[in-house]
Amino acid sequence: MKKIFMRMVSLFLAVLMVSSVPQTCFGHYYGYGDELEAEWKIGNLDGNVWHPFTSAWASSTLKEGDIIFRAGYAIDNKQKYQRPWVEGVRGSGIGETLTLYFDDEYCIGGLTFRLGYARDQARYNKNNRPSELLISFSDGSYVDCWFEDINAEQSIVIPDLVYTNYVEITILNVYCGTQCDDTCIYQVKAYEMVG
């Protein structure tokens, strides 16, 4: 009887683990302007208004041969180049910033991220990807966000809408790559929550 019970528990846990693997994540935060931990849920920001960024600036960029992994790659929608922004300092890039600008001030309620060199799984594994980011806005507010180590879009919902003309992203911690100590951000999008 004990064996049957243990098998049932093992099966239940296996089903629970498989069903809880996120594909697109939705982060909810308890508090605002503090160190906050995400509760990841399956979901996305479909149906909300996407506000494209118009320009980008970074505190550093990686140059490899003729390729500069510039800040603009994080907002280019991957139409021409499938490259990320990559910080360019020695080490894992803790403290490096990526600032993304709008053409006007918008009321932002959510952001989506593809972190790491997300073009394919091999590049993703090889390079660092952020595990924790500080996200700051021009109105003086900020959120401290944690991310899972998955090659998929992850979303955060900002608990109080912010009015901002830029989003500044600071690398606070990373998941280490297998070969390169370079931290990559592949894609960032901002949304106004509706409904």
Image (spheres, rainbow, N blue to C red):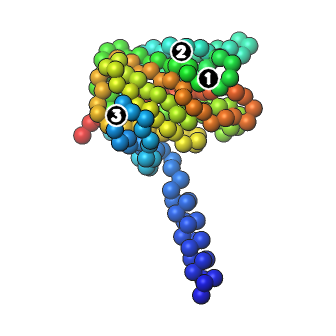
Instruction: Residue under label 2, please give it.
Output: 58
Q: Position of residue 67 (x, y in %)?
A: 68, 15
For disc 1, the marked residue is: 93
Q: Residues within 10 Å of mark 1 (few under 14, many from 20)?
A: many
Given residues 122 and 138, the one toward you in this image is: 138
Q: Which label's residue is closer to the chain start, 1 or 3?
A: 3
> Which is more toward the observer, 73 or 11?
11
The secondary structure type at the circle numbered 1 is loop
Q: What residue type is disc 3 on?
A: Tyr
Q: Is residue 76 visible?
A: no
Specify the quadrant that holds the N terminus.
bottom right
As drawn, is 121 to the left or to the right of 160? right
Residues under labels 2 and 1: Cα distance?
12 Å
Q: Can residue 143 be seen in this snapshot?
A: yes
Question: From what the image shows, is residue 13 above or below residue 6?
Answer: above
Q: Residue 180, how many percent across, how many down?
A: 72, 28
Q: Which mark is residue 32?
A: 3
In the rendered image, residue 19, in percent from the top left (x then y), is placed at: 51, 59
Residue drawn at (60%, 77%) of the image: 6
Residue drawn where x is 62% and y is 36% of the image: 175
Check disc 2 and report its element: helix, strand or loop. Answer: strand
In three-dimensional space, the C-alpha distance between marks 1 and 3, rounded to whole angstroms, equals: 25 Å
Please tell me which of labels 2 and 1 falls first in the chain.
2
Residue at the image position 44 percent from the left and 41 percent from the top = 37
